Image (spheres, grey):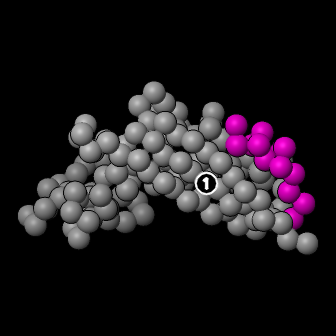
Amino acid sequence: MKFQMKPEGGFVTELPYGTLHVSGDETQGFRPYQLMVSSLAVCSGGVLRKILEKMRFNITDITIEANVKRNEEIANRIEHVHLHFTIEGTDLDERKIEKAMELTKKNCSMVQSVLGAIDVKETFEIKTHN
């Protein structure tokens, strides 16, 4: 990836999907911490989806809410991310989904990349359809 400085502030890169604007000023692009949290959430969500599909669950939707705790005294770094998954579908087994969540944390490359630096907590709730 190659990032080019923008005259008005921030940086830009071209990726296969499109142009990505990154800036500390959210009027100029996505903020770096937003991208970090998005990477953790979406990586986890994608891994969870694959695992649940392999377990033959009928999943109709997954929503992820990310709550972030930052430390203003130390470069405003991200210290804690709580990812809460709302999983919707039919015939969902809570114990099997707990196991899937454990596998998700072990297999998400983004979560594994920040271990020891950012505390990532993952919880879930189930919404079943009859």
Magenta stretch: give its range.
90-102
Residue 74 lies, in percent from the top left, at 25, 37
Residue 59 lies, in percent from the top left, at 78, 62
Please tell me whether residue 126 is drawn above or below residue 37 in the rendered image.
below
Residue 54 seen in the figure = no
Which residue is pictured at 8% across the width and 64% down the height? 7
Please give the residue where the numbered disc 1 appears in the rendered image.
84
> Among all residues in the image, which is located at the extreme left?
7
Which residue is pictured at 91% across the width and 72% down the height? 130
Instruction: Tell me: 73 left or right of 122.
Output: left
- Residue 71 picture quarter: top left
- Residue 77 picture quarter: top left
Residue 51 lies, in percent from the top left, at 74, 46
Q: What amino acid type should be assigned to the residue bearing mark 1?
A: His
Instruction: Tell me: 65 left or right of 73.
Output: right
The answer to which of 89 and 21 lies nearer the viewer is 89
Residue 37 colored magenta?
A: no
Which residue is pictured at 83% across the width and 49% down the height? 94
Total count of labels: 1
> Among all residues in the image, which is located at the extreme front?
73
Which residue is pictured at 77% across the width and 51% down the height? 52
